[in-house]
Image (cartoon, helix red, strand yellow):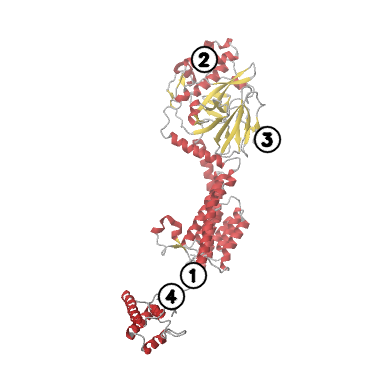
Amino acid sequence: MRTPPLLLGAALFFWGWQTGHLWLSAGMGAALEGARWWRRRWDFSAVDLQRIWMLCLALQAGAALILYSTQDRMLFVFKFAQSLPMSFLPLMLAQVYGMQEAMPATIFFWPFHRKLRSDQQTVHVSFPYFALCVVGTSASTQANGYFFEGMAILLLAALSWSRPRRVGIPVWAALSGMVVVMGFYSQQELRRFQTALEGALGGWIADMLHQPADARECRTQIGHAGEISLSGRIIWRVTPDDSGFSPSLLRQAVYDGYRNQTWTCSSNDYSPAASAKAETYNLLPSKPIEFDVRVAGYYQNGEGPLALPHGVFELKDVATPAAVQTNRLGCAALDNAPGLVECTARWGPGPSLDPPPGILDTNVSENERPVLAKIASELGLKNLNDRQKIRAVARFFADNFRYSLNISDRQEPGKTPLGVFLTTTKEGHCEYFATATVLLLRQAGVPARYVTGYAVPDNARQGKTFLVRERHAHAWALAYHSDNHSWEEVDTTPPVWADKSAAPPPPWWEPMSDMGSNFYFRFSEWRWSKTSLARYASWLMAPLILSLVWRIIADQRGRAAARGQENDAPPDWPGLDSELYQIDRRLEATALARHTGETLGQWQARLEASGTAPQPIRLRRIFALHRSLRFDPHGLSAAERRALADEAARWLADFAVENPRAKTGRLKLS
């Protein structure tokens, strides 16, 4: 079924108005509607139409590739829908400027074209294209108060064109008015319901997916019985410089307050970091000894913490438009980041981003104080300096404690879960060791903080890059040296944890999962490259698109040339191989030769009347068979054709006997 006049032009104009492509839509609409006045038509074959359909699919694939490379996920969906009218315009132009009333369905199902009957199934693509215009218009991200009115007019125009004739115009108008009014109020209520539903589900989903640790607080698993298991999903990719020296720890968050198995950050306000030049941030003065490490990670929502080594002083190659921010406790985060960020961190021994200690850095909660005071007294920490206290605490955990991810449900009256760990079970995971270390140092008078992030174990190396996985999540302590006013990382978790963190062993499919992860990482590198490789994405589709266009044009030219040759070539008359022409050539030099302008009947009558031509009865039979061969639409049967050849051969043989000197001559056609 065809669309009514000017409907497609109006739909395209409305699409361009709503999506910001007004001038483009005006040209597209003029090209489609101009077919009503342009009389020339092109004869597209089924192969041509199939190639045009493939061209449309290639255009849409190219649009998807470019949009996926330049837009975030939500905008990608809207922009992709908006591009539908542009991508499938060639097919619609082939419909309106072609000689076909409708397109064979086989062109849309070319892998199964042999199973479809092309003489039975055809499609007129005008209404499907109108539907694409409606979808593209509905995907507009620009607020416009005339959307409902314009869409209602377009849809009513399309429906009115197909109105059943048994339904009168007054009834149809009344029903249309009811539908418009009901649709107007329904869409308003649906919008309110959508807003309420998003608000309700947003909070519920946020609670359900709440992470145990973020920049504000870290709810530890201290006191929770059972085995902790983390996946092998790759979180960070860490590539050291040519020295091959990689940091063993990457921090993400720092906390200074502890209460009821939860660490908190007293001040989580971030401020922009200083930037000396584009994509470079100076966090601290340069250091005499420095190393470079490249850290790559995903930022799904455009923001999140950076994983950086202790002592980082500069960040380079931070992809625009991402911006680096830092907080009071020396953590760095990204804002407005692309989906993948690869940056180079310059780091070295010496000063760090951590500010001088505050009052919370020496605070110990009352319920933990009795056990901590007893252990500090047993270790004789009171009589040691800060460095000696730190070493003594580290030896205490190394000599007396074991690492375990399987925590028993052990409870003792008057003791907290951390107190049970320090005095009874003496086994636990990194959160136990880091928390106990921080609080024990504070009890001894050494300012300390709790840090979370990821470890970079040696067994995580693959080639030049360390693959830091979810199971490498780690916690450790920061201790303050009052003599030189610097902070030191103190990791008292037994080193065996890096091996036991993989227990149970990784699943057998992890290598295959890593292959998929590496492929997606390379694709994401291209997609979010700061060199804007996405600007050249269209060139990937250009050869295919140009090839399809060239094949369509070349086939049209070849078909036109073939038609011209057919018109110029002499007609292929039937019966040109008749044996009567052999007789004509044999008689050419005799008085019996056919005269110029003499008809076939006149020549036959003259031969029969001459009395010198042999076998006149056989000659009459030859002429009769020749006329049937040349002029009868049914021609001769196989037996009659053989009879003509035999009769002519015998006549020529008799003539040769009677006229041995006869010569052959030219051929005249009748």
Q: Residue furthest front?
A: 661
Residue holding disc 4: 573
Marks 1 and 4: which is nearer the front? 4
Location of residue 423 in the rendering, given as x and y in whole percent from the top left corner: 47, 16
Name the quadrant containing residue 133: bottom right
- Of labels 3 and 4, earlier in sequence is 3
Answer above or below: position of 510 versus 113. Answer: above
- Of labels 2 and 4, earlier in sequence is 2
The amino acid sitting under disc 2 is: Arg
Residue holding disc 3: 277
Residue holding disc 2: 395
Location of residue 149 in the rendering, given as x and y in whole percent from the top left corner: 58, 58
> Mark 3: which secondary structure?
loop
Mark 2 and mark 4: Cα distance apart in space: 111 Å
Q: Residue furthest left?
A: 639
Answer above or below: position of 369 versus 654. Answer: above
Confirm whether residue 12 shows in the render: yes
The amino acid sitting under disc 3 is: Lys
> Mark 4: which secondary structure?
loop
Marks 3 and 2: which is nearer the front? 3
Check residue 566 in the rendering and tell me which mark sits there, or answer none: 1
Residue under the point 58% across and 50% down: 141
Location of residue 159 in the rendering, given as x and y in whole percent from the top left corner: 51, 63
Using a 10 Å C-alpha cutoff, classify the residue at mark 4 as few (fewer than 14 neighbours), some (14 to 19) or many (20 or more): few
> Mark 1: which secondary structure?
helix
